[in-house]
Image (tube, helix red, strand yellow):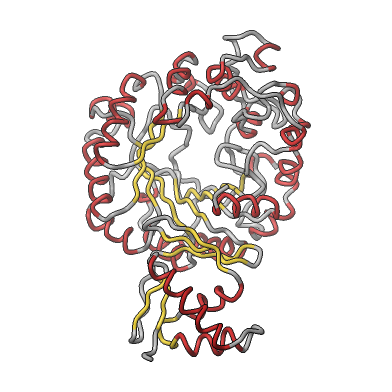
């Protein structure tokens, strides 16, 4: 299976509030809150680290989760956020977007 | 309740400043007849000072950031500030007259991920708009800017301040906004000048005109529900607070002064002397504002409108008592529902237009 790389879109605003990450897309005003695990993936989405490695280092090593389940959940999470333009997904590393 | 409203309520309950309005300058290229600001620069914050404050706001949990003025583009460093704010991942809204926005500026705003832009427009007729702004060709320039912004896919809202000189144009302007594919808001509030001069209040539209505005579904949604007589206040209503001012929202002036709201000129600290969180957490003024529940209000606690009134504590403060009524909101409640407020009955219907007494002034001026 090919590696997937994820990066945060430049159109996004984000802030932690009481342990939840608020994320909003300025283009279509979609608004999400991310739980602790999703926030860890979001914060590690630097465009250079493969998703599989993010799940291993930022999820499996930090939270008590089954690795296979964590990877499946991460795939679903990434797909959902990418359909809303909140995460960029590619099979190659992604250059940082401005700002 | 929407997810965003839920998070707003959570911020309110926790006392997190989720939203801040920052005026980066009071300078302006227009001289609107109703404007309350002194447009001279009395020592506005430097680029480095504002960037430092933005860093503090991000650390304090601010998510929604509104840049306003004056005219934000009078600052040559505005894009530098905007870029810094977006790097800190604020959701940024901008209030502007837009006359300095061309294609290049619109492209930059889009690239920086600005959420939305609110633009002051007073009429669909250039002669009326330009007479209010006192800037020749301002209507033409603002309209062009709206097109540049729309071309970039940015969300634009036309904000119209209703006053005697443009009252008859409101529906034509609303239609123009719809044709241009932009949102439209209207505000009948005229506030006194910063120096306390109340002569601008003569521009306020007659109260009776509010009735028609409140029955416009395009502005208020379900007009029947909006204009229904007030329901009997509940215990929850009396335990409630007026608004988010000082609870999850505050205003910062170009001189670093912090206030509960842009419309609540109670000086609560200065960011050149204290950190934002010190002011937010420890300011006696902000803590006093936070302590006021509906049951503490001197007149309004016994008013039938207390559960549904738009009572602005800032306007009440300007009238002399932050726990007292705001007569402008008494009028709105009355013309919306036909039911006089307790304050109006205390006085006499038709004679409730009190002249506000205090306006925004730097902290140093009152200490």
Q: Quadrant of residue B239?
A: top right
Count the labels in the image: 0
Q: Is residue B296 left or right of residue B20?
A: right
* Quadrant holding the C terminus of chain A: bottom left
Residue B23 x/y as whole percent: 48, 48
Residue B332 x/y as whole percent: 55, 22
Q: What residue sits 43% from the left and 18% below the top?
A: B212
Q: Is residue A1 left or right of residue B356?
A: left
Q: What residue sits 76% from the left and 42% below the top?
A: B291
- Taking B356 as reference, is B266 above or below it? below
**Which one is nearer the viewer's eye here, B34 or B331?**
B331
Q: Is residue B361 left or right of residue B210?
A: right
**Which one is nearer the viewer's eye here, B254 or B228?**
B228
Q: Is residue B124 left or right of residue B219?
A: left
Q: What residue sits 44% from the left and 69% below the top?
A: A81
Residue A78 x/y as whole percent: 45, 75
Residue B189 x/y as whole percent: 49, 28
* Quadrant holding the N terminus of chain A: bottom left
Q: Quadrant of residue B96?
A: top left
- Taking B167 as reference, is B3 above or below it? below
- Taking B47 as reference, is A72 above or below it? below
């Amino acid at each position: 299976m090919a590696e997937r790389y994820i990066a945060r879109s430049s159109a996004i605003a984000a802030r932690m509030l009481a342990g939840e990450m608020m994320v909003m897309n300025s283009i279509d005003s979609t608004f999400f809150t991310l739980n602790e695990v999703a926030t860890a993936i979001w914060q590690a989405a630097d465009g250079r680290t493969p998703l599989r490695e993010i799940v291993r280092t930022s999820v499996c090593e930090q939270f008590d989760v089954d690795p296979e389940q964590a990877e499946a959940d991460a795939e679903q999470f990434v797909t959902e956020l990418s359909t809303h333009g909140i995460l960029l997904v590619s099979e190659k590393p992604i250059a940082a977007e401005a700002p | 309740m929407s997810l965003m409203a839920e998070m707003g309520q959570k911020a309110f309950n926790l006392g997190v400043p989720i939203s801040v309005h920052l005026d980066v300058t009071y300078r302006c290229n227009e001289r609107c007849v109703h404007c309350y600001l002194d447009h001279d620069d009395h020592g506005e914050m430097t680029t480095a000072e504002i960037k430092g404050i933005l860093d503090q706001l991000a650390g304090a949990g601010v998510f929604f950031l509104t840049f306003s003025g004056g005219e934000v583009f009078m600052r040559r460093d505005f894009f530098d500030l905007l870029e810094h704010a977006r790097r800190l991942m604020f959701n940024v809204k901008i209030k502007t007259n837009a006359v300095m926005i061309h294609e290049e500026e619109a492209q930059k705003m889009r690239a920086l991920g600005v959420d939305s832009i609110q633009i002051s427009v007073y009429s669909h007729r250039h002669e009326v708009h330009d007479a209010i702004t006192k800037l020749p060709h301002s209507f033409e320039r603002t309209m062009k800017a709206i097109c540049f912004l729309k071309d970039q896919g940015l969300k634009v809202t036309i904000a119209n301040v209703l006053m005697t000189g443009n009252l008859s144009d409101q529906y034509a302007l609303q239609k123009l906004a719809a044709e241009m594919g932009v949102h439209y808001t209207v505000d009948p509030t005229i506030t006194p000048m910063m120096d306390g001069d109340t002569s601008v209040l003569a521009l306020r539209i007659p109260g009776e005109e509010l009735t028609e505005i409140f029955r416009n579904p395009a502005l208020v949604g379900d007009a029947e529900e909006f204009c229904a007589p007030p329901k009997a206040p509940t215990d929850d209503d009396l335990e409630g607070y007026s608004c988010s001012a000082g609870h999850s929202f505050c205003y910062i002036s170009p001189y670093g002064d912090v206030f509960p709201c842009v419309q609540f000129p109670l000086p609560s600290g200065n960011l050149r002397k204290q950190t934002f969180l010190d002011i937010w957490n420890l300011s006696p003024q902000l803590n006093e504002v936070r302590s006021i529940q509906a049951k503490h209000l001197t007149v309004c606690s016994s008013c039938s409108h207390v559960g549904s009134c738009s009572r602005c504590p800032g306007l009440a403060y300007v009238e002399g008592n932050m726990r007292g009524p705001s007569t402008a909101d008494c009028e709105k409640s009355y013309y919306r529902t036909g039911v006089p407020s307790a304050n109006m009955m205390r006085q006499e219907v038709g004679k409730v237009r009190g002249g506000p007494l205090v306006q925004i002034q730097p902290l140093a001026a009152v200490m």
